[in-house]
Amino acid sequence: MLRDQQKEIINDMCDSIKEYLTKKLNSVPENWDGIELREWFADTAREKYTYKKMELPRKRDYENDILVYNL
């Protein structure tokens, strides 16, 4: 995949999550600080963008890339 296509996907996902969370912000408890907000962000990102479980060879390659490229 071309680098510009990768950037477009990341930007689209970030914009989508930002829009969704901003709309829901009035429902968030006022006592939530960065810890809860980060957890909510991560949970929402996982829920919205995890389509299905990766097949084993691809998951293994992904985990290896995370380690090798220090991501």
Image: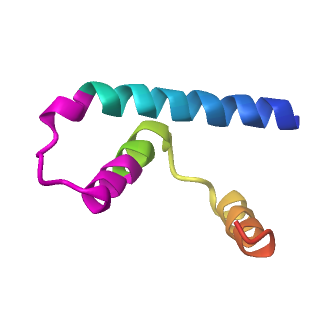
Residue 1, visible in the rendered structure: no
Locate residue 25 relative to residue 9 in the image: left or right.
left
Can you say which quadrant of the picture contains the C terminus? bottom right
For the stretch drawn in magenta, the main secondary structure is: helix
Query: What's the colour scheme?
Result: rainbow
Which of these two is toward me, 65 or 54? 65
Magenta highlight on residue 57: no
Place of residue 15 in the rendered image (x, y in percent of width and height, measured from the top left): 52, 28
User: Residue at 37% of width from left, 47% of height from top?
Assistant: 41
The residue at the point 76 percent across, 37 percent down is 6
Q: Relative to residue 5, is residue 16 drawn left or right? A: left
Is residue 28 at least partly visible in the picture?
Answer: yes
Residue situated in front as seen by the camera: 3 or 57:
3
- The residue depicted at 14 percent of the width and 34 percent of the height is 27
Q: Which residue of the protein is positioned furthest toward the bottom in this rendering?
A: 67
- 33 drawn magenta: yes
**The N terminus: image quadrant:** top right
Residue 16, x across and y down, in percent: 48, 27
The magenta span reads: 24-42
Query: Vertically, is 67 above or below 9?
Result: below
User: Which quadrant of the figure has residue 8?
Assistant: top right
